[in-house]
Image (tube, helix red, strand yellow):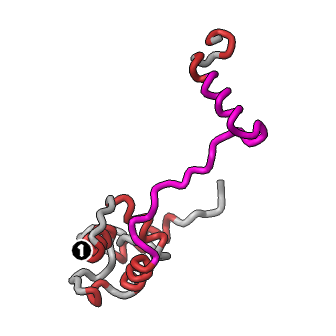
Amino acid sequence: MERLLGFPEQTVYDWLDVVAERDATALGDLPRPGQSTRLTEERWSELTATLAASPSEAGYNDPTWTPALVRNHIAETFDVEYSLTHMYRVIKRARLSYQTARPRHYKADPAEQQRWREEFKKSGRR
């Protein structure tokens, strides 16, 4: 049977069991609920209200909310641990944007940079 179908025999029997249990037209993956949220709706509302204000109003000395600061705030306030990567999703879900400053070299001359931009503009020729 493996050579004929290209699957191990047990896999074929498992699929036959699935077909027998369900309607044959409804085959495919069942919906997967995913992991439940660790913050209740009430706590989420509290968090978004806090993030809408500046960090100084929440008692921090930082000028803006950063993923690390949001993670720290959630851990301290709600006793819930998230990964730093997940904080980007939390910030996005809270309808905030994560922005970083464009780095500038301390010796960069703004007038020279503007002159270079003016000379480098596209001429329209190909």
Q: Which quarter shows the N terminus? A: top right
Q: Residue at x 61, y 18 (%)?
A: 7
Query: Which of the pair 61/109 is nearer the observer?
Result: 61
Please state if 53 lies on the left or on the right of 16 as rendered. Answer: left
From this view, report whether residue 18 is shown above or below residue 86.
above
Within the magenta stretch, is there residue 49? no
Q: Determine the residue positioned at 42% across, 76% down.
A: 44
Question: Is residue 31 within the magenta segment?
Answer: yes
Image quadrant in which you'd find residue 33: bottom right
Q: Residue 16 or 37: which is nearer the viewer? A: 16
**Mark 1 belongs to which amino acid?**
Glu
Residue 108 visible, this orientation:
no
Toward the viewer: 31 or 83?
31
In the picture of the structure, the residue carrying the numbered disc 1 is: 76
The furthest residue to the front: 21
Quadrant of residue 48 within the rendered picture: bottom left
Q: Is residue 82 visible?
A: yes
Highlighted range, magenta: 12-41
Q: Residue at x 57, y 17 (%)?
A: 8
